[in-house]
Image (cartoon, rainbow, N blue to C red):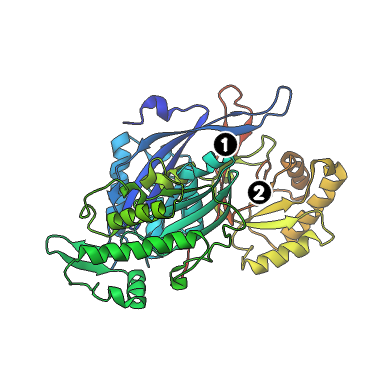
């Protein structure tokens, strides 16, 4: 399909793009996010996301890698460019979204440089993120496990199994309460079926082989013995499912802390499977992907049946992470905001949380947080998140005293502009007006209606409004958890 002129002029909508550069495959999804005034009659306008519709899915493409296992940046960028051309999409059409480098690719030495390169194709407001916790969460959202848990009240463990990793997300009543990542996936062994030999063995596979003398014949260059490979896949399938029960048989393969939940604490109603391996459950051709993927899928299916475990293959299983990336954690601010459009968009603002209601001074808290987060406020702006404030506390005196403290710390710290303040309660416009009276000629952005209970960074986009009420504006905010995952493993 193509993104025609009608879809480009979306009116009360944002175009979101999700790009997943994975260990084995890469793909792109374009989503239309519709927003509208969600307030009751006679209440202050409040724009909110009301619908998410996938309007384009690219083909599943093999991730271009160099001979040394790094991501081939130029070829990967060309894949994305061709996908854009297919639907007539320009980067200027994109409002928000996420570029996610996942699995083993996230730990490639050049991952951050590749992300920076690809971000130029993705428009001015696309997030570059990579990391096992974020990947786990995105996969659970994209698999629909989060929505299903919310609607049914069921507790679901989503396991996204790709080429390099298995990502876990425990979802209780629509909320992801825990995530984890295991270094096990379908590309741990690679095969040359023309020569009928093993062509590559990953470091994680080698660890399992070394621990089990039975698998000692799994060596690069050795003839493929399908029986032995099936037994190896069975060992990995057991490992994946034991990890789901918070049992770590190979601690060295955990890329995060293990799941803390055991079935004695929270009863898991269903296991949902997503990712490339899940999509291979119905595949009969063991040679299809020249790797362990189909073997692992068959082993998992057999083990789940043996354990009498209720499970489901997620819709669009292989695309779960990229769909989750396209939907992402975007929120719209309240309508009572203070900003200047020329200061936007802002990307990768570090969040500094301040409890505005404790006896500890705001200045003391800010300074402590800056030190803990190792942030140089004189060079880079931050988003100060004002927590603890309740609606009933919002008097003029309270806001004036808070503004005075904030203004003082802004000045004494010689903080980099713009000064960005974020809150959940409706205070942004009033606080902005008071601050502007204290900080003449300073650039100030105040945003409310945003919940940042999770996340280390935010992006703030350009203002949006509905065609029915162009004067009511909100700012799209993307809450981000990790920019880049660093691992010694």
Q: Position of residue 375 (x, y in %)?
A: 61, 65
Q: Closest to the observer: 223 or 62?
A: 223
Check the picture and name the quadrant holding the N terminus: top left
Q: Closest to the observer: 163 or 354?
A: 163
Q: Position of residue 98 (x, y in %)?
A: 46, 48
Q: Residue at x 78, y 48 (%)?
A: 389
Q: Is residue 346 left or right of residue 406?
A: left
Q: Closest to the observer: 192 or 340?
A: 192
Q: Which mark is residue 232?
A: none
Q: Which residue is mark 1?
A: 151
Q: Are marks 1 and 2 in contact (CB under 8 Å)?
A: no
The part of the image, by quadrant, that contains residue 464 is top right
> Relative to residue 464, is residue 379 depicted above or below?
below
Residue 228 visible in the current orientation: yes
The CA span between labels 1 and 2 is 43 Å
> Is label 2 in a helix, a strand or a loop?
loop
Check the picture and name the quadrant holding the C terminus: bottom left
Q: Residue at x 38, y 56 (%)?
A: 303
Q: Which residue is mark 2?
A: 443
Pick out the residue farthest to the right.
Answer: 397
Residue 106 visible in the current orientation: no
């Amino acid at each position: 399909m193509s993104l025609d002129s009608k879809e480009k002029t979306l009116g009360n909508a944002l175009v979101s793009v999700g790009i997943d550069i994975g260990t084995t495959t890469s793909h792109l999804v374009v989503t239309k996010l519709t927003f509208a005034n969600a307030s009751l009659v006679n209440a202050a306008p409040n724009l909110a996301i009301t619908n998410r519709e996938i309007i384009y899915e690219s083909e599943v493409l093999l991730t271009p890698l160099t001979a040394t296992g790094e991501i081939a940046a130029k070829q990967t960028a060309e894949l994305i460019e061709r996908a854009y051309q297919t639907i007539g999409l320009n980067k200027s059409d994109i409002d928000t979204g996420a570029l996610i480098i996942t699995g083993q690719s996230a730990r490639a030495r050049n991952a951050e440089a590749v992300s920076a390169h690809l971000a130029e194709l993705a428009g001015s407001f696309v997030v570059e993120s990579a990391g096992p916790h974020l990947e786990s969460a995105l996969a659970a959202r994209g698999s629909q496990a989060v929505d299903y848990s919310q609607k049914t009240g069921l507790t679901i463990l989503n396991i996204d199994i790709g080429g390099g990793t298995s990502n876990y997300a425990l979802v209780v009543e629509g909320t992801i309460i825990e995530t984890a990542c295991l270094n096990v996936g379908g590309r741990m062994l690679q095969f040359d079926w023309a020569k009928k030999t093993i062509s590559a063995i990953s470091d994680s596979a080698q660890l399992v082989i070394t621990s089990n003398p039975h698998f000692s014949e799994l060596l690069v260059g050795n003839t493929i013995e399908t029986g032995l490979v099936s037994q190896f896949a069975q060992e990995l399938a057991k490992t994946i499912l034991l990890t789901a029960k918070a049992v770590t048989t190979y601690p060295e393969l955990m890329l995060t802390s293990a799941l803390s939940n055991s079935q004695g604490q929270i009863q898991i109603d269903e296991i949902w499977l997503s990712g490339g391996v899940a999509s291979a459950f119905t595949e009969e051709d063991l040679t299809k992907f020249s790797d362990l993927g189909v073997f692992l899928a068959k082993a998992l299916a057999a083990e789940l049946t043996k354990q009498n475990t209720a499970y489901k293959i997620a819709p669009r299983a292989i695309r779960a992470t990229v769909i989750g990336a396209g939907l992402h954690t975007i929120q719209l601010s309240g309508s009572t905001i203070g900003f200047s459009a020329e200061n936007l968009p802002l990307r990768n603002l570090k969040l500094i949380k301040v409890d505005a209601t404790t006896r500890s001074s705001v200045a003391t808290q800010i300074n402590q947080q800056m030190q803990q987060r190792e942030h140089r406020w004189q060079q880079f702006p931050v988003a100060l998140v004002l927590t603890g404030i309740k609606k009933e506390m919002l008097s003029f005196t309270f806001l004036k005293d808070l503004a005075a403290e904030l203004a003082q710390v802004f000045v004494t710290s010689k903080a980099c502009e713009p000064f960005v303040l974020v809150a959940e309660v409706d205070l942004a416009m009033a606080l902005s007006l008071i601050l502007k009276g204290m900080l003449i000629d300073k650039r100030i952005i105040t945003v409310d209606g945003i919940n940042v209970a999770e996340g280390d960074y935010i992006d703030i986009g350009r203002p949006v409004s509905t065609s029915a009420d162009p004067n009511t504006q909100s700012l799209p905010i993307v809450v981000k958890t990790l920019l880049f995952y660093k691992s010694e493993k």
